[in-house]
Image (spheres, helix red, strand yellow):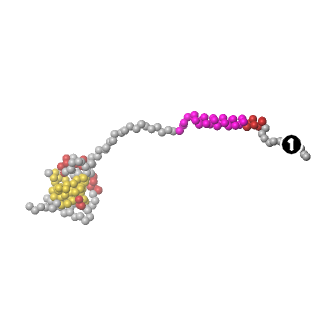
């Protein structure tokens, strides 16, 4: 038989020495990266929160807020600009002093008077005469700057009178009722 020299394949000791050193180097690199990750300064931006202090609640004052007391022609006449934009109503009725046109008339209360401009409402037709009592369910107090926003055409006389007044009433025909007259 033939004599075959069989050698075991493997890594000789010199090569083992080189691989061991490589593992140590790799371990030191991993350890260095771990240390850097743990101890490196944090450069991320951090939102700084301001301390919260309780602010007092401030309610804006609005001159166009309906006062608690009922609005009368006398209170409006005393300070007209404070009432612009507020609502007026008089369920008890107010006397018609003078009729200017079919769309405007003067109402009177305790010697004070105010111009009332009527806006048309479909299906409504209110005929107002001097001396009658009218009930105004809802009207808005306006100043001369509102004239261009009133729907429909106003004749020149009504426009001129409204511009001369500090305030006037704008009432929809549907919110106006002529009180029945009682026989004497």
The local crowd at label 1, few if under 14, some if 14 to 19, many if 20 or more residues have their Cα within 10 Å, is: few
Image position of 61 (left or right of 109): right
Between residues 117 and 180, which one lies in front from this camera angle? 180
Q: Which span is picked out in magenta?
A: 20-44
Residue 63 in percent (x, y) is at 27, 46
* Secondary structure beneath label 1: loop
Which quarter of the picture shows residue 32? Answer: top right
On screen, 24 above or below 105? above
Between residues 105 and 163, which one lies in front from this camera angle? 105
Between residues 51 and 1, which one lies in front from this camera angle? 1
Image position of 33 (left or right of 153): right
The residue furthest bottom is 123
Residue linked to disc 1: 5
Q: Is residue 43 magenta?
A: yes
Residue 49 in percent (x, y) is at 45, 38
The residue furthest left is 184
């Amino acid at each position: 038989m033939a004599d075959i020299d069989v050698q075991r394949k493997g890594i000789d000791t010199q090569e083992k020495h080189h691989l061991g050193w490589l593992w140590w180097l790799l371990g030191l690199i991993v350890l260095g990266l771990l240390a850097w990750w743990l101890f490196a300064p944090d450069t991320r931006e951090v939102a700084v929160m301001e301390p919260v202090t309780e602010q007092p609640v401030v309610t804006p004052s609005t001159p166009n807020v309906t006062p608690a007391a009922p609005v009368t022609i006398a209170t409006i006449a005393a300070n007209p600009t404070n009432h612009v934009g507020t609502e007026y109503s008089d369920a008890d009725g107010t006397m018609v002093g003078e009729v200017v046109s079919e769309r405007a008339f003067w109402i009177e209360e305790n010697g004070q008077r105010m111009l009332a401009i009527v806006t048309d409402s479909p299906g409504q037709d209110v005929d107002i005469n001097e001396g009658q009592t009218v009930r105004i369910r809802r009207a808005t107090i306006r100043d001369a700057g509102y004239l261009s926003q009133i729907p429909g055409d106003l004749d020149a006389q009504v426009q001129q009178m409204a511009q001369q007044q500090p305030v006037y009433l704008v009432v929809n025909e549907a919110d106006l009722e002529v009180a029945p007259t009682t026989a004497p």
